[in-house]
């Protein structure tokens, strides 16, 4: 009964099995899916927190790390751990770099800094927020790769870590890793390559003959790499690896407590309890796929990528942004007469799920082998959507297109943050309701906009104070007289 109810709930979700969801799920086929579930469930209750009790998990984790290190051209010194996903791998890499920086510069007591391209995954911003680093964002060149000269200028004596992507999520391009690596090595600053997205894809692309710049441990100066097994490793969710050139970097990731009444507690990564299922499924996926399996999936994926790119290029009014350094396609409007967000609204209405992006406005497709079957139908719907939007320019100010269009244009990002904060408070509040931010503008909205116009992001401070005084009043009203 309960399981039936759950299946019903799931049936109303985005359809990924037929390739209609262009991110979030990495699915090979039904046979692999069933196999993964069994591998995962065999270690469903086991806990990697204590590797002495669950030696099986320790062994599988170390084999996953070893196989990943070899795939990314690391030598025998490369070490690492598994984590719950790309974000945790990145959090750990930043935390390790910060610890290392503190130990090396023990006289220095300023704030350690992180130097990253504007396109770097948000997990770096999150890591800096959690671990108290200052982030210096470096602008991109016209080809969406980071401007290395600007990056060099952003580095200073407080820089604890430089990071770049292979490839970055939004436009799918690889940053100039070799150039950055040479600079990082010369300056003796750790350099992390975020290959969460491409780590389990680019090596196979290269083997298939695609001409890619080196992005992994072959590049001198690269000191750590994150790569997600739960993406193109086609494993179960909750599995990534973070690798370091040697133990002198990894050791700063560990946390060891010696005085807790519960005992001596060493912890390799952020998690306490480490679920066995994802570790086991990652190991099983890599063993079962092997080189042949991954090569086959990569070939099919690239067939889909190339079909999508040439299909999009044939549609008047659209263009592909960035070049293909990996399995994603980023699409933007090629002129003002097509509003790309209105196109996405049309596609949503036909059951496609896509990511809307900003700076510039575009949509993103993370392509997997399973998407090949959906390419002809997608291109047909895309063509129709573009024609429809061109014939109905008013669509740009309706539905989600209006909201995303407005959000992309608001110069004060604080105002956007404020609205998103309200949505989250609603969604995670006691009644789980998302506040309706659409509809008619109220007098309050108008006042807020005037405040923003006048004071820019400084207005946020005023709004936050207003919010907290509301809380104080509500609190006072709840007191007994
Ligand atoms: C380049 C890149 N880095 C990091 C991540 C974060 O991975 P996760 O969502 O598993 O935390 C992603 C996710 O798409 C990514 O594309």
Image (cartoon, rainbow, N blue to C red):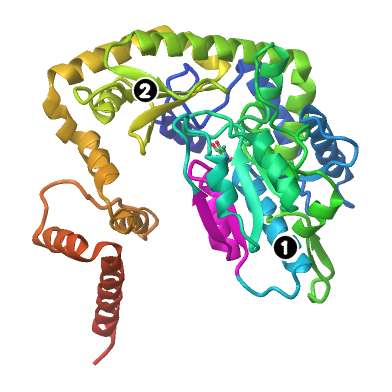
Work out which quarter of the rendered image holds the C terminus and state it: bottom left
Q: Secondary structure at mark 2?
A: loop
- In this rendering, the answer to whether 69 lies above or below 30 is below
Residue 395 coordinates in the image, percent (x, y):
16, 28
- What residue does disc 2 label? 352
Q: Is residue 122 magenta?
A: yes
Residue 104 coordinates in the image, percent (x, y):
78, 65
Seen from the viewer's position, the closer of residues 323 and 349 is 323
Visible residue check, residue 277: no
Numbered tag placed on residue 437 in the rendering: none
Q: Secondary structure at mark 1?
A: helix
Q: Name the residue at 43% across, 9% down.
A: 310
Q: Name the residue at 28% across, 11% down.
A: 316
Visible residue check, residue 107: yes
Seen from the viewer's position, the closer of residues 396 and 98 is 98
Seen from the viewer's position, the closer of residues 464 and 440 is 464
> Is label 2 within 8 A of ligand 1 (CB to nearest ligand atom)?
no
Q: Residue furthest bottom?
A: 481
Seen from the viewer's position, the closer of residues 259 and 120 is 120
What is the crowding at mark 1: few (fewer than 14 residues within 10 Å), some, or many (at least 20)? many
Numbered tag placed on residue 101 in the rendering: 1
Gap in angstroms between the C-alphas marked 2 and 1: 46 Å
Q: Is residue 24 magenta?
A: no
- What segment carries the magenta color? 111-137
- In this rendering, the answer to whether 106 lies above or below 149 is below
């Amino acid at each position: 009964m309960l399981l039936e109810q759950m299946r019903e709930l799931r049936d109303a979700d985005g359809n990924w099995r037929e390739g209609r969801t262009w991110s979030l799920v990495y699915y090979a086929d039904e046979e692999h899916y069933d196999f993964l579930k069994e591998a995962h469930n065999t270690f469903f209750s086991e806990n990697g927190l204590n590797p002495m009790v669950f030696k099986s998990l320790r062994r599988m984790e170390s084999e996953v790390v070893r196989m990943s290190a070899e795939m990314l051209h690391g030598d025998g010194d490369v070490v690492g751990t598994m984590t719950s996903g790309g974000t945790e791998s990145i959090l750990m890499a930043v935390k390790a770099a910060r610890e290392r920086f503190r130990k090396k510069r023990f006289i220095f007591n300023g704030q350690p800094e992180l130097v990253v391209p504007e396109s770097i995954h948000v997990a770096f911003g999150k890591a800096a927020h959690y671990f108290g680093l200052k982030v210096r964002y470096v602008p991109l060149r016209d080809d969406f790769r980071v401007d290395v000269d600007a990056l060099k200028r952003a580095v200073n004596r407080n820089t604890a870590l430089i990071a770049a992507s292979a490839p970055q999520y939004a436009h799918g391009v690889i940053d100039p890793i070799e150039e950055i690596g040479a600079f990082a090595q010369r300056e003796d600053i750790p350099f992390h390559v975020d290959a969460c997205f491409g780590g389990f894809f680019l090596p196979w692309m290269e083997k298939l003959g695609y001409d890619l710049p080196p992005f992994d441990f072959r590049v001198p100066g690269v000191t750590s790499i994150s790569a997600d097994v739960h993406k193109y490793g086609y494993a179960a969710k909750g599995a990534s690896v973070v690798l370091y050139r040697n133990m002198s970097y990894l050791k700063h990731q560990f946390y060891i407590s010696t005085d807790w009444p519960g005992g001596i507690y060493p912890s390799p990564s952020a998690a306490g309890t480490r679920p066995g299922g994802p570790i086991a499924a990652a190991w099983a996926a890599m063993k079962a796929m092997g080189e042949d399996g991954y090569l086959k999936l990569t070939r099919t994926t690239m067939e889909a990528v190339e079909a999508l790119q040439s299909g999009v290029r044939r549609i008047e009014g659209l263009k592909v942004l960035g070049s293909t350094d990996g399995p994603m396609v980023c699409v933007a409007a090629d002129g003002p007469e097509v509003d790309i967000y209105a196109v996405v609204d049309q596609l949503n209405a036909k059951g496609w799920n896509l990511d809307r992006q900003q700076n510039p406005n575009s949509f993103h497709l993370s392509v997997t082998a399973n998407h090949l079957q959906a390419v002809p139908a997608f291109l047909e719907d895309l063509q129709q959507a573009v024609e429809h939007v061109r014939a109905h320019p008013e669509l740009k100010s309706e539905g989600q297109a209006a909201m995303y269009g407005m959000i992309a244009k608001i110069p004060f990002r604080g105002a956007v943050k404020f609205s998103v904060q309200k949505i989250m408070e609603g969604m995670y509040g006691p009644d789980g309701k998302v506040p309706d931010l659409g509809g008619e503008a109220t007098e309050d909205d108008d006042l807020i906009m005037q405040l923003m116009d006048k004071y820019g992001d400084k207005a946020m401070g005023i709004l936050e104070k207003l919010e907290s005084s509301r809380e104080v009043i509500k609190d006072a009203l709840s007191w007994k007289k």
